[in-house]
Amino acid sequence: MAKIGSKLLLTTGLAAIIYVGATHGYMDMVQDVFFSDPNNIYNYRTLTITEEERENIINNVEDNLGYNVIDSKEDDYLLLNAVLENNNLNDENKYKFLEYGDMFYDNPYLNREKVYRNLRDVKVQYGAIEDEEFSSIKGLYDYDTNTISIFSVADGVMGHEIIHCIYNVDRDGLDRYFSEGMTELLYNEYFEENPFLEINTYTYEISAVKMLADICGSDVILQAFSESSMKPIIDSLASYSSKKEATENIRLLDELMLEYETTGSVTHYVEYEDMLDYFTDISEKKYNFDNNCFDYNSFDYNKNMFKNIFSTDNIESYLDYIEEVGIGEKYYFNKKLEADYTYFKVVPCDLTFEVLSYVKKN
């Protein structure tokens, strides 16, 4: 993401002192921009505003963020104007949301109309969970009220919930493991210093998503997430098997992950092994047993990583696997990682894990 201009950085610095302070001062800095309908400048992915309105928004974004919006990025970066115009967000939170511009541009499936509406109206609130049963929840995105609730200031909590907000199309359209795994994987790739190692948050959810991405392709996975539908994944698998087989095995993966998310472990049912064999068979068909194939080796690595879910102490087994084999350095969605990681690299690694707690958040 291009550096945000000094004008916004100054206001953000002031807001950091107050943290959750007043939300109105920032808006005084932003020029008025008038639209035919400020909450509906898109129809799905297509702009519906006039050229004059478009120019006004571009000027607003450029003036406040300190960089030029190039032609090829206009339709996506105009989404940032929704953040600038959101009266519910303070300066600190606006800065957080504005960091997601690259994620917009990298996604050809994004429902711009829905994202714009969400970003223009989303609210952020801070508090604490009193019920001990839910004390592990660090953040929450409420689909019905378009509200992010933050219960911990830990790094990544706000970012995780912002991604839920961006992709709020249909909360019931995706399997839960897939929604959480994709959300965390996207956050890791765009914002974590080491985007390839997940050791305590949605560990197996991410592994499941990576397995599917290796056999279906990252574009199919991103399309499914953006449209809140497992159908693109099922259709991709069905091209190598039957639609019935594809649907059944995606159902089994969801069933397995529901058991894990509910109990922290998975009974070693034979059908789950058959499910992994199904995915392996498709990988072998697609990549023709090519041991030199980047994606073929990546799938095998992630499948073996995922199989640790059957262990009695699955997190410890997961970490042991990494220490023994190494870290699979492969990007899936962030194009900026391509220059640094262009091959599948698994090397023995010397890692020290001080905290092995498995933290779950919504």
Image: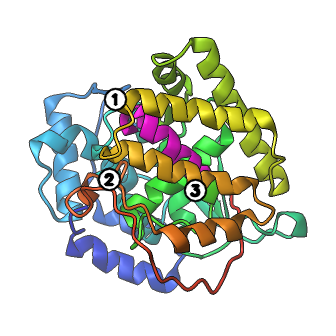
Q: CA distance from mark 3 to mark 1?
A: 41 Å
Q: Which amino acid, mark 3?
A: Met
Q: Could you tell whether 41 is left or right of 255 in the image?
A: left
Q: Which residue is mark 2?
A: 334
Q: Which amino acid, mark 1?
A: Tyr
Q: Which residue is mark 3?
A: 305
Query: Looking at the picture, does residue 152 appear above or below residue 246?
Result: below
**Residue 162 can be seen in this image:** no
Mark 1 or mark 3, which is nearer the start of the sequence? 1
Label 3, residues with CA under 10 Å away: few <14, some 14-19, many ≥20: many
Mark 2 or mark 1, which is nearer the start of the sequence? 1
Question: In the rendered image, which quarter contains the C terminus?
Answer: bottom right
- Residue 235 is situated, as x and y percent measured from the top left of the image, at 49, 18
Q: Residue at x 40, y 64 (%)?
A: 346
Q: Which mark is residue 42?
A: 1
Element marked by disc 2? loop
Q: Which is more foreground, mark 1 or mark 2?
A: 2
Element marked by disc 3? helix
Q: Which amino acid, mark 2?
A: Asn
Q: CA distance from mark 1 to mark 2?
A: 25 Å
Query: Looking at the picture, does residue 3 appear above or below residue 51?
Result: below
Q: Residue at x 14, y 31 (%)?
A: 51
- Please report the bounds of the magenta region as a residue range: 205-223
Question: In the rendered image, which quarter contains the N terminus?
Answer: bottom left
Residue 99 is drawn in which quadrant?
bottom left
Q: Which is more foreground, mark 3 or mark 1?
A: 3
Q: Could you tell whether 163 is left or right of 125 in the image?
A: left
